[in-house]
Image (tube, grey):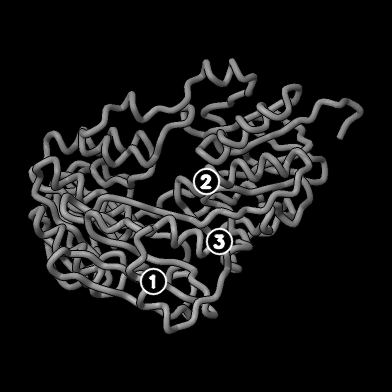
Amino acid sequence: MTGSDVRRYVIIGNGFAGTTCAEQLRKHDPACEVTLFGDEPYPLYNRISLPPMLRKQLPEAKVMIRDVAWHEQHRIALKLRTSVVRVNTEEEVVEADGTSYPYDALLIATGGRPNRCDVPGACDAANLFAFQYLDDTRAISEYLEHSNVAVSIGGSFIAYELAEAFAVRNVETHWLIRGPRALHRILDEAASELVADAAREQNVHLHFGEEVDSFTRSNGVVTKLRTKKGLEIAGECFAAGLGLTMNTELLAGSGIEISKNGILCDDHLETNVPGVFAAGDVADFFDPILEIRYRMGTWNNAGAHGKVAAINMMGGSEKYHDVPEYSSLLFKGQTITQFGLSPELRSDLETVRRIDGEKKWYRSLYYWQDRLVGGIMMGKGNRAGKRKYVEAIKSKQPFPKSEWESMLDWTA
């Protein structure tokens, strides 16, 4: 710090994690200086509202959470359309637009960017979209107004949200999935079949085991895709959900450790460089509840990270202690709620599950060393007991195997 008593906080990334952190810093340290960088032209908006916006079930005005006036009122220096190009931890400054911004504590909440289709015909195609940002949503929505056929590419949550939106907009919908089933990283065959059933009820054409080989273009616009197995699908709107690459390039030469998943940080969200923290999608953090390192790209997780990071940037000692949760509608006929760990993050979990084919319900619980550590609940009206499960995870209480099956019936 300088001789001044005023602490200078810099936050890179004005998503939910970064903006929440800025708000908490201002709330608890009225005299501090807060500078918040965002490379988009917009203040904070609700990314989980983008799918209903694409479905035309929510107006764009409802997606926006903060405006420029709010930042001015809270004395948060908001730098939009501004990319930080370098973090200098030795001098404790970040560099953007040829200017150096000094900090006493730094938060990196840069998130990730969508992976693109890297096949012939894909580069700069006008109607081949990713689905991550507000501008993506606007562009896809405009194309759907004049499309007869739309194709969603990928087996991810983003890809199903795309397929769902296409179907709701009454466009002939094809969902192209490279693997043997949808959401295969977290769902077993039985659960994935419930997703497939819900998709088929919305007249979605499912294509499993198919990977894009090339796109045919005319005047810069994709007119058809071809898979490696020879399947051809003509259409007007193509969009992909192929995962994210974390935005860590600005850390080159900074000494801040990164992994293949993001920025390495501890259970206080602090990196190996004192005073530098990471939060949100980009944070590869150690969870003291689940006792594992992972990266979690959910909205609730980002907000919780922002609060923890703010406390610790001010000199506190707060551990992240929330259990990650995710809930979503799966087409009109299904819902999914996920909490805690899944086999995607640990291969040594033990599982109990129950399927009700008549109700189209599915419930699975995951155990590690006799502790409940996660679960998935699918089916409308099948959320009872979730809070009890989450509290059991937080307690780290061991449960004998003789009780595991009966725990599937928890409703309180």
Q: Secondary structure at mark 3?
A: helix
User: What is the CA distance from the residue labelled 1 to the residue labelled 3?
Assistant: 16 Å
Q: Secondary structure at mark 1?
A: helix
Instruction: Give the amino acid at mark 1.
Output: Met
**Left or right position of 95 against 181:** right
Q: Which residue is mark 1?
A: 407
Q: Give whichever of 151, 104 is nearer the camera.
A: 104
**Left or right position of 366 against 227:** right
Residue at 45% in and 45% down:
299
Residue at 49% in and 74% down:
346
Q: Residues within 10 Å of mark 3 (few under 14, many from 20)?
A: some
**Left or right position of 367 against 127:** right
Q: Earlier in the sequence, mark 1 or mark 2?
A: 2
Is there any visible trace of residue 77 in the rendered image? yes
Q: Give whichever of 189, 137 is nearer the camera.
A: 189
Tell me whether circle 1 and circle 3 mark residues in contact (CB < 8 Å).
Answer: no
Is there any visible trace of residue 180 in the rendered image? no
- Mark nearest the camera among 1 and 3 is 1
Instruction: Give the amino acid at mark 3.
Output: Lys
Tell me where residue 403 appears, x and y as whole percent. 42, 79
- Mark nearest the camera among 1 and 2 is 1
Instruction: Give the amino acid at mark 2.
Output: Ala
User: What is the CA distance from the residue labelled 1 to the residue labelled 2?
Assistant: 29 Å
The C terminus sits in image quarter:
bottom left
Tell me where residue 302 appears, x and y as whole percent. 52, 46
Q: Secondary structure at mark 2?
A: helix
**Left or right position of 121 against 273:** left
Q: Which residue is mark 2?
A: 302
Q: Residues within 10 Å of mark 2 (few under 14, many from 20)?
A: many
User: Mark number for residue 40?
Assistant: none
Would you identify the image quadrant in which residue 292 lies? bottom right
Q: Which residue is mark 3?
A: 394
